[in-house]
Amino acid sequence: MRNFIGVLLAALVTLSAAHAKPVIHLDGKPVFELIAREGARYGPEERAQIVERRLASFADSAVPVSEIRSEETDGATDVVAGDQRLVTVTDADAATVQRPRAEIADGYT
């Protein structure tokens, strides 16, 4: 499952070179760049570490890749697998790269 996740997530297109984009790794291999803005609750590097832990947990789980989906919440779009949140795209993240948050989240699914 880890190979498939890596291939799936590596397909995410880099959205902006002007903003912090920490690289998310799985098993020591880069899989995608996270859209992260300075001044958020968590800094870009801390946010990347959180996402990496979530992806590793998902990769080690029995949850099938087909369970990855996005869910709209108030002011954010969560990418989830089963009942586990993998990454959240906020309105502020979307504004950073001037794209709808749902479009960004779809790139993660």
Image (cartoon, helix red, strand yellow):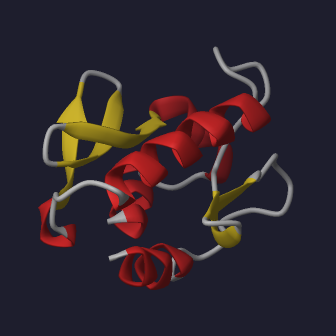
Which residue is at 69% across, 71% downward? 30
Which residue is at 31% across, 38% downward? 85
Image x and y of residue 35, in percent: 64, 49
Q: Count numbered badges in the picture.
A: 0
Image x and y of residue 31, in percent: 60, 71
Question: Would you identify the image quadrant in which residue 65 lies?
Answer: bottom left
* Image quarter in which the C terminus is found: bottom left
Which residue is at 22% across, 28% downward? 73
Does 36 sit above or below residue 59?
A: above
Q: Is residue 94 visible?
A: no
Image x and y of residue 91, in percent: 47, 33
Image x and y of residue 105, in percent: 38, 55
39 on left or right of 85 = right
34 on left or right of 82 = right
In depth, the one of 32 and 52 nearer the eye is 52
Q: Is residue 41 visible?
A: yes
Which residue is at 26% across, 54% downward? 61
Question: Would you identify the image quadrant in which residue 27 lies?
Answer: bottom right
Does 59 sit above or below residue 5?
A: above
92 on left or right of 57 = right
- Tell which residue pokes out farthest to the top in this image: 41
* Image quarter in which the N terminus is found: bottom left
In depth, the one of 47 and 55 nearer the eye is 55
